[in-house]
Image (tube, rainbow, N blue to C red):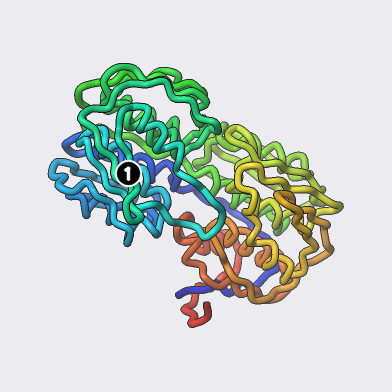
Amino acid sequence: MDKFIIQGGKKLEGTVNVSGAKNASLALMPAVLLTSGISKLYNTPRLNDVFTMIKLLTQMGVKIEFNNEELIIDSTGIFSYEAPYELVKKMRASIYVLGPLVSRYGYAKVSLPGGCAWGPRPINLHLMALERMGASIELVQGYIIAKTRKLNGAKINFDIPSVGATGNTLMAATLAKGTTIINNAACEPEITNLANFLVNMGAKISGIGTSILEVEGVDELKPAEIETIPDRIEAGTLLVAAAITKGNIELKGANENHLYSILSKLEESGISLSINNGSIKLDARNSEIKSVNVTTSVFPGFPTDMQAQWIALMCLANGTSNVTDTIYYDRFNHVPELIRLGADIVVNENTARVVGVKKLTGAKVMSTDLRASASLVLAGLAAEGVTEVLRVYHLDRGYQRIEEKLNSLGAEIQRVQSSEY
């Protein structure tokens, strides 16, 4: 098991490229289960979660080559419709195979999902949608077993705009008989990326990018190609890393339209930004960070996946801020670890009250989940002295060797093996 040793106090400077989006890749890859043949996904990040999805699809009979950032996926020889616990427990996104399998083959056996060790994130909306479309659902010994002769189009209304349920339902609806309308659908860029891939495959989808998606089912889909969108959460994390170290960086390959809420909050906090054709320049060298309140929301609101990183920045801001997470009420496992570094934070229900301090001091801290890990790295970059971040395997699930990108900007981070847990 690896850990990071971070020598704090280094200002980040230079240019860095944004990788493809983890959450987009994990939806695009299972979509190939809807067709037979060779599909290609470009700009795919080399992440542990992506490799877990590769193992899962390979176990079903899919053949995959991963060349640099290109995935060549041959779905001709699918022979298994099961997603076993041993793989699904590692990653919640494994649930994305459910919709395509039951839609194309009329059967799926998928373990109840795992992933980050925080919060109840039920899959009831996924199951409700499939049942509305005519699938029978059983929960047997920790597995979801879905069966149908043929899915039928239906009107589906989500109580909340769930990204996962929207993606699963969208894939299932492409081969259903008739028309499916998804109301209160998630509008995240990752869903738009998936919808565009399905259209490339021959699906008939209208309303892409809006909260109402209409899908007219077709008899079959064909292999296709698409480029994975840039990772907006990695982009946001790198920008906050520069801000917290009072650095000066240029971020290339980002999509500013996916980052509006993050960019606006950075500007509100007193950070200088310049945006031009996918290039985002951030200059915090002469900035005094102001405390700025944040409330997470569905896209285009401030993403819950940036909540922990924002709290890290607010730890060194001038004043007091309130950071409220309306998506996941208990996503604050990073707070006790930030306090170990000298932060002044009190959590009350789903709001963290952050009083800015003059400095953070290096200490040994432990990662608990993906985005919590990122917040600890950011705090360690700004802290005086040495910070050790344990369990960085969480980071490897969602960031492509983030220490290498940060080191290229002037950070001093070592990845070393550790026997500590």
Q: Is residue 285 above or below residue 105?
A: below
Give the x, y percent position of residue 124. 45, 40
Q: Nearer the viewer, residue 6 or 189?
A: 189
User: Is residue 307 shown left or right of residue 134?
Assistant: right
User: Is residue 166 shown left or right of residue 159?
Assistant: left
**Placement of the N terminus among the 4 image quadrants:** bottom left
- For the point 44% across and 33% down, the residue is 166
Q: Nearer the viewer, residue 135 or 29?
A: 135
Q: Is residue 311 above or below residue 362?
A: above
User: Could one spot residue 47 in this view of the protein?
Assistant: no
**Residue that mark 1 sits on:** 138
Q: Quadrant of residue 14?
A: bottom right
Give the x, y percent position of residue 400. 45, 57
Question: Residue placed farthest to the right in the image?
Answer: 319
User: Could one spot residue 93 in this view of the protein?
Assistant: yes
User: Is residue 43 shown left or right of residue 414?
Assistant: left
- For the point 29% across and 56% down, the residue is 84
How many badges with numbers are in the image?
1
Give the x, y percent position of residue 213. 44, 22
Q: Is residue 15 above or below residue 385?
A: above
User: Is residue 253 shown left or right of residue 293?
Assistant: left
Q: Quadrant of residue 39?
A: top left
Question: Residue placed farthest to the bottom in the image?
Answer: 419
SS at circle 1: strand
Mark 1 residue type: Glu
Badge 1 density bin: few <14, some 14–19, many ≥20, Cα 10 Å: some
- For the point 61% across and 64% down, the residue is 377
Give the x, y percent position of residue 64. 22, 50
